[in-house]
Amino acid sequence: MGPVASAVVPPADDVFRAPKGVHDVLPPESARWVDLVARFARRVRRAGYGMVVSPLFEHVEVFERVGEHTDVVAKEMYAFTDKGGRQLALRPEGTAGVVRAYVQHHPTPPWKVWYVAPNFRYERAQKGRYRQHWQVGVEVLGTDDPGADVEVIALLDGFYRDLGLTGVKLLLNSMGDAESRPGYVAALREHLLAHADALGDEFRARVHANPLRVLDAKVEDWQDVIERAPQLTEHLSEASRVHFELVQEGLQALGIDYELAPRLVRGFDYYTSTTFEFQTAALDAAQNAIGGGGRYDGLAEQMGGAPTPGIGFGAGIERVMLALDAQGDAPMLGGLDVFLVDGLGAPGGTESLVLVELLREAGFAADRAFGGRSVKAQWKAADRAGARFGVMLGRDEAARDAVAVKDLFSGEQVEVPRTGLVAWLQARTAGEETTA
Ligand code: HAM
């Protein structure tokens, strides 16, 4: 985006609302975010990835390396000049900043990192497409071993399984290497130009700038020509062909199903060799990509670094959540383990305070109501919090030094001695996922 000629002032009613295309994440939804990120962190840590936190903004040149003719750079970037006159931009995606950090700090390869971060794109805002969206992702720098491609794809596949997401399809393609590309681009340009006259100036301009960027265009009138375009995989060099075969063998060995998608070019110019995308049947076609990535073996060099192969992916948190919602039967993520209902009727009393602290110290996610609410209101709050168990401190039970425990999923209720509560909960939740 260039400088705006005149500022758009929102109506007074809208000033204190989130701007178009961005949103707040509030409880209880935010608990699902925490849970999703925790599951991702656990999975990638088991595979030897360390977390990287990179800046929200960079010099604009860093992001321009993802492709000056891509929509993300040419139309959607939040670029600005800071008070010192620097040309900066908010991060539109995660890879460029990580590669910039690799080039700057030259860690020992292979460098395996993961991140969770917001990205900014001035998109046409709609359900599943936002101007600020969040991604979890990984990048591996410093190896061109096809085993790294398989590892990265398997991580994302496993993450969706961890979440219980079904109906997910993996699309796979190879963009070829520096040797494969010129021959393909020439053949593609020739095919496209043969039809350019009927398709207008923008089409012709794109074909000249980078014909690959025509392949992922959504313009209706262009689809017929795109459908009949030559395919990348027919133009692979010997090295690219072998690499692609080894990646497929690895996926087959791990039992990961995939579909070859010769027109999957993805939206950035940095991709070489393997590209992939996971799609869900649960969302509209325009927003059905819940994660994607690929190799970018030339990117570090374009940022002034030594030639360094790399591969990674990003998965959109909001879209994964929408897919889980659409599935309906997805497990409720991140609720409380225990909600304590105080039936002793003594506001300010210390019994429920002590019991909640005891449960928290034992590792359970436990909460209670404040302000002397009625027992009925407290049970409602327990439901609202998505608690697994309600623990009732009632007068009758107190007389027997016990508590009533209700399984809020099944409705079953039992009395448990107060001193045995932690052990009882631990036994009941053994093998289940709690915070304990
Ligand atoms: P991307 O395909 O642009 O790739 O984004 C990755 C994922 O982020 C998409 O599959 C989608 O789930 C989500 N996403 C993208 N844009 C939006 C949006 N406007 N609103 C909601 N969700 C969105 C990348 O960003 C690359 N950096 C991935 C990568 C990593 N390639 C190599 N390493």
Image: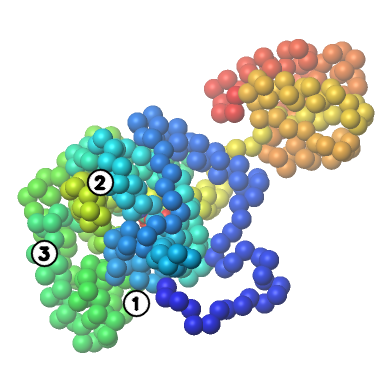
Q: Are marks 1 and 2 in contact (CB under 8 Å)?
A: no
The x and y percentages for residue 380 are: 79, 40
Q: Which residue is mark 3?
A: 182
Q: Is residue 175 visible?
A: yes
In the structure shown, which secondary structural element does the residue marked by tag 2 occupy? strand
Q: Which residue shows up at 56% across the image and 28% down it? A: 433
Evaluate if marks 3 and 1 touch, with contact meaning CB atoms under 8 Å apart.
no
Quadrant including the N terminus? bottom left
Nearer mark to the viewer, of 3 and 1: 3
Residue under label 1, please give it. Answer: 220
Which comes sooner in the sequence, label 1 or label 2? Answer: 1
Q: Which residue is mark 2?
A: 310
Q: Amino acid at mark 1?
A: Glu
Left or right of 181 on screen, residue 393: right
Q: Amino acid at mark 2?
A: Gly
Q: Quadrant of ligand 1?
A: bottom left
Q: CA distance from mark 3 to mark 2?
A: 21 Å
How far apart marks 1 and 2 lie (CA) works out to 34 Å
**Residue 170 can be seen, yes or no:** no
Say whether residue 234 is left or right of residue 43: left
Element assignment for label 3: helix
Which residue occupies 43% across, 57% down?
57
What percent of the width, then of the height, locates residue 281?
Answer: 43, 55
Pinpoint residue 392: horizontal percent, then vertical percent.
81, 26
Give neighbour class at mark 2: few <14, some 14-19, many 20+ (Cα, 10 Å): many
Q: Dividing the image into 4 quarters, which one contains the C terminus? A: top right
Beta carbon at label 2 within 8 Å of ligand 1: yes
- Compare marks 3 and 1 and give the one earlier in the sequence: 3
* Marks 3/1: CA–CA distance: 27 Å
Labels 3 and 2: the sequence-earlier one: 3
Between residue 285 and residue 16, name the one nearer to us.
Answer: 16
